Structures are given as structure tokens and as C-alpha cells.
Image (cartoon, rainbow, N blue to C red):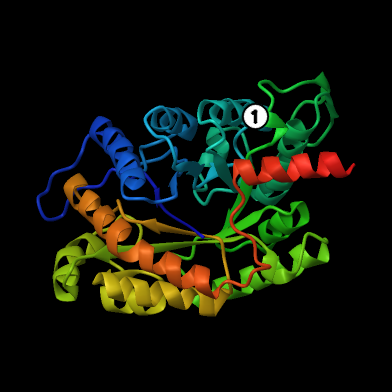
Amino acid sequence: MQFGIFSVGDVTTDPTTGVTPTEHERIKAMVKIALKAEEVGLDVFAVGEHHNPPFAAPANPTVLLSNIAAQTEKIVLSTSTTLITTNDPVRLAEDYAMLQHLADGRLDLMMGRGNTGPVYPWFGQDIRQGIPLAVENYALLHQLWREEVVDWQGKFRTPLQGFTSTPRPLDGVPPFVWHGSIRSPEIAEQAAYYGDGFFANHIFWPTSHFQQLIAFYRQRYEHYGHGKADQAIVGLGGQAFIRPKSQDAWNEFRPYFDNAPVYGHGPSLEDFTEQTPLTVGSPQEVIDKTLTFREHFGDYQRQLFLMDHAGLPLKTVLEQLDLLGEEVVPVLRKELDAKRPAHVPDAPTHESLKAAREAQTVTA
């Protein structure tokens, strides 16, 4: 079981002080947060891709993650998400293979359509073609990483003739891909078809909505012959604000929640915590609520928390990571690993994928 954090890189005014970090300060803070995540024993640091305010960092995740890779040794670096619709698959193949080499294999990535409409025309695409773009672009990316010489023709870009993407994936093993979605069964179908992971970032919508998406993905994963439904590779999002005392957490987080750029000035904090995975409280309360995710979705492989948003100062975020890494994750790891049946796999890593590839070669 992997535990980690993901950042959306929002540049938001702290409602308690009126201070807004500069883009430079926010970018530097994200690096410090990633280093702290490794220090406290988390497994994954992931960062999103945004091209519009207030999400000013980063527009190019590979640059930020390359910097972090150079300063870390163990933590897996990922995205949350990489826009498969508005990025050219050839460029994605090259950039992320390069990052995979720089990180010595400590890389996977999450593909998503993107949920910000204006981004599509900014990059010359039509949002009405979102699903077909996601399907076609990923099919090409998948092929580019697995075939030395590619001949290809599709609807949304010029053809390729005898093209080789460089550098080639490290050890001949492409980065593992998660497909992230909050609403599209077509993306769950795509993940299942390729035997990839499916990440349900269920931080905003009720649990029942994501239960349907994940159940559909598991069913189709088995249909395509990748394993039993309960062996499908599932990741979940979540949110937490932790203090040793529950009431302190509620009092401190409330102004940030009330003014958050995405859900501020909407549902009350009480209603939101009741209806979504957001947990505000003590370490034990975060543990108790997170353990219910398994009851709702079955055994899964990756749990990522959003913790550095809504204008929270860096000092507070680092304190959150101390509590998460020292008091929450060790208990969750022990409890969930003990409950997971032996036939349910761990999250794929470069080393496990490399070993599987070598075993297939020997068998062949």
C-alpha cells in the first residue's frame, strides 16, 4: 500500500493574514513539501498540471519533478494529472521518459482529460472532443513507449512514419500509468483496457458516485483478462487537516475551508466532511475515516492526501506532514496491509514492472 500527497499548486491568499504568496514562493514551497514528504516516510509525491489562475504552479510538472528528483532518493514522483488531451503524445513520451531516467525509475504518472474548459482552445483543441482526444492520444503514447519504430495515423495530429521516441524508457519499462477521472466511465474503460491503474480523486463528490466508477473499472479490468476484479489497481484521493486535538483542527481550518478557491462559499465545513472524504480532526479521526474507504471501494493500492491548498502557510503544511507521516500513515499501513488478501497486488513500481518483464522474457 502506497501513501502520499498530491498538490494542485494553487496560489491562494491566506484568509487569516491577508498574505498571498508569490508564484516564486509557492513553487519553492512545493519543493520543500516534497522533501518533507520523503523525510516523514511517505511513498509518493504528486503534482497537478494547470495553466490558469489560481493554479499557477506548475504548468509543466516535469520541470518541478526533475528538481525534486535531484534532491530525493526514495519517494515515487507522480502527476495528478498530466493532460492527455492538450499535450502532444510525442512530447509526453519524450519528457516523461527523460524524467524517468533522471529519477532512476521513481516515476509514474496520472493521465486526465482536464476539467478546465478554456485550456482546450489555449492549446488548439476542442473541449467537445475531450473523450476522443484522450483515447487517441493515449493510444499513441502507449505505442511510442513500447515500439522502437512507430508508424501511426489518427484524427488529431499529423501522421508518424518510422518515428522513434527518445530517450527510450528506462530498462525498456515504460512508466506505470494511472488514469484519473471524477466523472467519465470512458476513462475507467480506457484504464481497464490497457490494464493500467484507475485513480478516483473523490475529494469533492459523494462516495456513492465513485463507488460506481471504480466498480465499473474493476469489472472491465477482469473482462479484458488482466486479473480478477479485486486485483485491479485502484488509487484514491482524500483530504485531511490534522491537529492533536480535534477542536483545534476545526477552529484552525474553518477560515481556509470557507474561502478555498474551489469549494469556498459553498457547503458548510460540517456538511462537506460528512459527504466527502475530507477529514478535519485528530490523527485517530483521520485514521478511522480513511479505513472506511476500503469498506466502500475494496482493497486498493494508493492513497493520496491533499494538504497544501486553500492558502495554508508552509509552516502549517509541514506540521501536517509530520502528523500524517508519524501518527497516521504507520497505523493505516499496518491495518490495510493486514486486511489485504495475498492475491491482491501492491501498487506497481519500476522495479516490480522490470522484474515482471524479465520473468516474461525468460518464460518466452
Task: Specify the quadrant of the image occupied by residue 190.
Answer: bottom right
Q: In which quarter of the image is the C terminus?
A: top right
Rendering coords of residue 145 (x, y %): 72, 33
Q: Is residue 21 visible?
A: yes
Q: Is mark 1 on a helix, strand or loop?
A: helix
Q: Name the residue under label 1.
A: 170
Foreground residue among 283 and 10 = 283
Foreground residue among 221 and 101 = 101
Q: What residue type is labelled 1?
A: Leu
Q: Which residue is drawn at 49% across and 31% down?
A: 62
Q: Residue at x 77, y 55 (%)?
A: 193
| Residue 122 drawn above or below residue 268 | above
The single residue placed furthest to the front in the displayed view is 362
Q: In the displayed structure, does residue 244 sit left or right of residue 343?
A: left
Foreground residue among 197 and 24 = 197
Rendering coords of residue 163 (x, y %): 79, 20
Q: Which residue is drawn at 9% across and 50% down?
A: 17
Task: Specify the quadrant of the image occupied by residue 305.
Answer: bottom left
Q: Residue at x 71, y 39 (%)?
A: 137
Rendering coords of residue 42 (x, y %): 39, 51
Q: Is residue 84 visible?
A: no
Q: In the displayed structure, does residue 173 sit left or right of residue 272?
A: right
Rendering coords of residue 14 (x, y %): 17, 50
Task: Specify the quadrant of the image occupied by residue 46.
Answer: top left
